[in-house]
Image (spheres, rainbow, N blue to C red):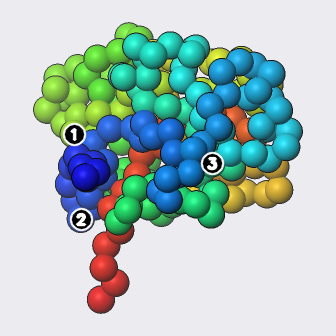
Amino acid sequence: MIRPPETIIIGEQEWMSSNLDVNSFRNGLPIHHAVNEEEWEYAAKNHLPAYCLYENNQTLDLIFGKLYNYYAVINENGLAPANFKIPSINDWTDLAAHYGGLTEAGTHLKSIDCWESGTSDVSVLHELCLFNGYPGGLRYPLGYFDLANSNGFWWTINDYDLANAMGINLYYDDTMLLKRHYSKGSGFSVRCIKITAVS
């Protein structure tokens, strides 16, 4: 029996308490594991779903979870576990509003550990880091990695144009939660949110 993901409640939202770390879709079909730069770039160029481990390091996978390209996020087989969904920009904006808005939320969403020293107030982090956002870095479409420990990137479900989709960013030296568009072939973390009943 598959255990349901652990969750946290922030305001009126229920989020998974850690980044997604699955290697198959909801229906059981495997997601391609890109084990080198060539495989990751091939998936990006051909719009194929793929995941990877940061720097192909199993230890980091246990901390940060996996990085997925956007083609995995939107695949019809379903990336999010049952009863969960990939959050929208609006879901993230509502989360930020609980912590004072986009300009301040970054401080409260970061995990206590793993982040490079920056502008975050550690006393605030110890009190309010329910979300526990780890700096899992990213993988660019050409296959190379950006630094972990300095930033965290998460996909939203929102498309931007044919080549790009919207992502959420936290940086070690910034209190903001940033919304930007990135190439769909990039590798980001994924944090799912519980589907709520519509009244």
Q: CA distance from mark 3 to mark 1?
A: 27 Å
Kind of residue at badge 2 = Glu
Q: CA distance from mark 3 to mark 2?
A: 27 Å
- Between 96 and 45, the one lying in front of the other is 45
Count of all numbered marks drawn on residues in the image: 3
The answer to whether 72 is drawn above or below residue 83 in the figure is: above
Callout 3: SS:
helix
x, y percent for residue 123: 17, 23
Q: Is residue 189 left or right of residue 39?
A: left
Callout 1: SS:
loop
Kind of residue at badge 1 = Leu
Callout 2: SS:
loop
Q: Which residue is mark 1?
A: 130
The answer to whether 133 is drawn above or below residue 105 in the figure is: above
Q: Which residue is mark 3?
A: 72
Q: Is residue 141 left or right of residue 64?
A: right
Q: Residue furthest right?
A: 45
- Identify the mark at residue 12; answer none if there is no mark: 2
Q: Earlier in the sequence, mark 1 or mark 2?
A: 2
